[in-house]
Image (cartoon, rainbow, N blue to C red):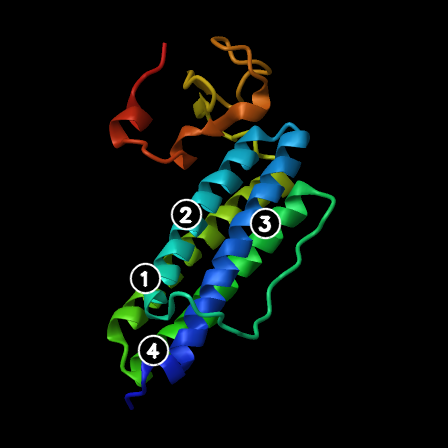
């Protein structure tokens, strides 16, 4: 089946996705502020890191709507309202929403785009769906660590990094304060959970 882009469901889905990604970026920025107030700067960083990726997704969807520049488009959609008192609740809600996009929303949008004759847009939805799965896994992992009171505790010695200055320490838990910059424990993260980490860095002895 091939339909015109102007009358397609894919056009509406692109706008729904753009709105959803834009809202996700703002939700995660707000959640980052709540984490900051609670001294959980590592969680703040996770939310802000993900928010930037959601902005990139929004831009990708927005650009596909270029043929309708200057128009006012109307859509209907359901979007989560995540206003919770605790950081843990925000992490769990974020994980749920990301899995929803992966398993249902974008996977469904990809199928519709393919059926309507827009293979490139279908591929875009599919690829971003896979990214949202990674986001869901990331939020779920940090939610589990926080809920089990293991965010700053590990059963075996591992490497921890201060997100402010990059100081590395090998221990079962990071210090109460960073030895280099003086930032508190809330800035530390397991090195294995940081982006841009090499295998060499994971195995290097820290003195």
Q: Earlier in the sequence, mark 4 or mark 1?
A: 4
Residue 103 appears anywhere in the view? no
Q: Earlier in the sequence, mark 3 or mark 1?
A: 3
Give the vertical position of 164 relative to 61 (above or below): above
Q: Earlier in the sequence, mark 2 or mark 4?
A: 2
* Closer mark to the observer between disc 4 and disc 1: 4
- Reading the image, the residue beneath label 2 is 53
Q: Dots 2 and 3: beta carbons under 8 Å? A: no
- Reading the image, the residue beneath label 1 is 127
Q: Secondary structure at mark 1?
A: helix
Residue at coordinates 48% horizontally, 57% vertically from top-left?
21
- Mark 2–mark 1 Cα distance, whole angstroms, equals 13 Å
Residue 185 shown left or right of residue 50 in the figure:
right
Residue at coordinates 25% horizontally, 26% vertically from top-left?
200
Q: Secondary structure at mark 2?
A: helix
Give the vertical position of 64 relative to 163 (above or below): below
- Reading the image, the residue beneath label 4 is 113
Q: Position of residue 205 (x, y in %)?
A: 32, 16
């Amino acid at each position: 089946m091939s339909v015109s882009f102007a009358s397609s469901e894919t056009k509406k889905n692109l706008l729904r996705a753009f709105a959803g990604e834009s809202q996700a970026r703002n939700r995660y920025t707000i959640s980052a502020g709540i984490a900051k107030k609670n001294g959980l700067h590592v969680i703040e960083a996770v939310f802000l890191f993900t928010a930037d990726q959601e902005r990139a997704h929004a831009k990708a969807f927005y650009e596909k709507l270029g043929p309708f520049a200057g128009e006012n488009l109307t859509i209907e959609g359901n979007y989560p309202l995540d206003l919770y008192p605790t950081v843990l609740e925000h992490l769990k809600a974020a994980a749920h929403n990301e899995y929803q996009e992966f398993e249902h929303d974008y996977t469904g949008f990809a199928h519709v785009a393919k059926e309507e004759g827009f293979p490139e847009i279908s591929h875009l939805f599919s690829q971003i769906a896979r990214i949202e799965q990674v986001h869901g896994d990331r939020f779920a992992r940090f939610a589990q660590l926080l809920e089990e009171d293991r965010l700053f505790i590990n059963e075996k010695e591992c490497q921890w990094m201060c997100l402010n200055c990059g100081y590395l320490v090998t221990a079962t838990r990071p210090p109460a304060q960073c030895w280099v910059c003086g930032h508190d424990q809330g800035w530390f993260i397991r090195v294995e959970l940081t982006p841009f980490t090499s295998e060499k860095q994971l195995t290097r002895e820290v003195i």
